Amino acid sequence: MIWNPLVETMDRAALRKLQLERLRQTIAHCYGSVPFYRKQFEERGIKPEDIRQLSDLRLLPFTVKNDLRDHYPYGMLAVPMRDIVRLHASSGTTGKSIVAGYTAGDLDVWSECVARVAVAAGAREEDIAQISFGYSLFTGAFGLHYGLEKIGAAIIPISGGNTERQVTIMRDFGATVLVATPSYAMYLAEVAEKMGVTGELKLRLGLFGAEASTVEMRREISRRLNVTATENYGLTEIIGPGVSGECEAFTGQHINEDHFLPEIIDPNTGETLPEGETGELVITTLTKRGQPMLRYRTRDITRLTYEKCPCGRTTARMAQVTGRSDDMLIVRGVNVFPSQIESVLLEVKGIGPHYEIEVTRENYLDRLTVLVEFIDAGLVDRWSELEALQRRVHEKLRSVLSLDVNVKLVSPNTLKRFEGKAKRVTDLRDV
Amino acid sequence: MYVKQISVFIENQPGKLAAFAELLAREGIDLVALSIADTTNFGILRCIVCDYERAAKVMGDAGYTARLTDVLAISVPDRPGGMAGAIHALTAAGISIEYLYSFVRSAGHNALLIFRVENLEKAAKVLADAGVALISQEEVRTL
């Protein structure tokens, strides 16, 4: 089923025409209403009317997260506060928060975009959706809430935390759809198993997002919760969830291209890359009024395809995000994405899906340590097998990362579990 | 005939063993025998205690991964050659020892040897035939 066939299956030439028209409106709006953008244009000697075709987009400068921080809280708004009806913010784990303002129209677009993503993933009006994202300044819960409500699903706005109660409600209310971060879904699965109620759950579909996950992680969640695990994508700076999501053909995440114009660039040079190449995703909003974004650098590494999908949609699809360029660790000169480590760990039998990564520096040498739980308590009496397991993890990591990783096995159920976005990496090198 | 050994997983980090030792002290758990095998990252502590059921529960409740295993415990004279007789009997019967540790409860008398083999039943019979004194779990309680 397709929520909005008119745009989701639109002929690409017509879609490009629509995008160009909206791009020009957005640029004029930014130039006229946001001093930051006007200054950027003037510094480069560009006028809004210089953008005559979609490919002229590359004339425009990028917008980066720091620009949003520098204009905290309201410097990026393009409308007066009386037109803003909602403010969200992204957790400033690395610095000041960034703020996002929405007009009533922006909230409508948001609901529409998430409705499409939810339906593409397989959600229907008969569904009962448990939203285990925290309802807060974080966009995740509200976005999914609007979209799922729009398609007519029944919503359990349980928010995050209190995991045993989550499982009880999930069982008692007969939730069929789970909305959560992949790491929290994994934890929920574990708690449900401990409570012995996994078999009584009615879950059939998982809408996972807010953090990147690997195919292996979703396969594991899918197996343990008995759900079809789908991923959707979005970011506060652009709108929140609803930028893109997987369809039932699992061929990548369909971007709502009538609202968001994607590009792939080389993160080092800023050059636009041809279709199919892997690079950093850059997004320009096409309809946002409250806080439009021109060429926003997402830091997410992916690639795009514009081929028609077997599901019938014609919109661009982005591949699984392999990692946020911010997340990339450089260890002894080797680029390491935590997602690579996750993929390896989930393929090794005998260890659990939870892990922590620690980077330290000893005698000017970087040291990467991975903590992972062994799951068979019986191994405690078989020292040589435990050691062999450790060696196996070490070897597999070395073959993928070309790096000697210090593997630390720890007891089952001792690593941190996450209720929201997981924080698995600790870099102690600069402390 | 067999004795219950508790194996506990302990991270190889400063303070981890101390914390475990404090737990035993607090709970009044008396060790009859103890051994630690370690790598750079983890250690496995094996021990024989009087009340293994309570000890295993205490450790589990405190968050340790603990496991009970059947092992053989024998008493041999505490003098040179004391161990040789028992080992010789096992070797002659083609039984290999996975691990072994020993403990002397009071100097000059008998030493306690604890070991794990693949086939406990056969090993127990071989030892009994060779006249080696096997210690039962009941006897451990009185040691």
Image (cartoon, rainbow, N blue to C red):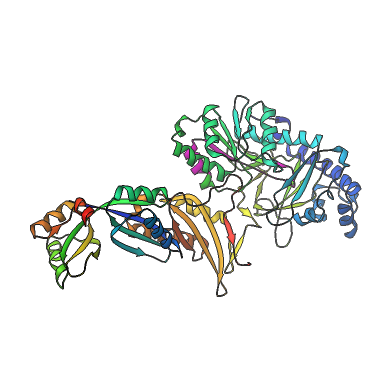
- Quadrant in which the C terminus of chain A appears: bottom right
- Asked if residue A285 shows in the view, the reply is no
Q: Give the image location of residue A306, x and y in percent.
A: 68, 44
In the image, A191 versus A9, the foreground residue is A191
Q: Give the image location of residue B81, x and y in percent.
A: 14, 71
Residue at the extreme top: A126
- Quadrant in which the N terminus of chain A appears: top right
Magenta span contains residue A235: yes
A388 horizontally vs A223: left or right: left
B38 horizontally vs A149: left or right: left
In the image, A377 versus A340, the foreground residue is A377
Magenta span contains residue B87: no
Q: Give the image location of residue B16, x and y in percent.
A: 44, 61
Q: What stretch is highlighted in magenta?
A: A218-241
A62 horizontally vs A31: left or right: left
Q: Give the image location of residue A350, x and y in percent.
A: 40, 51
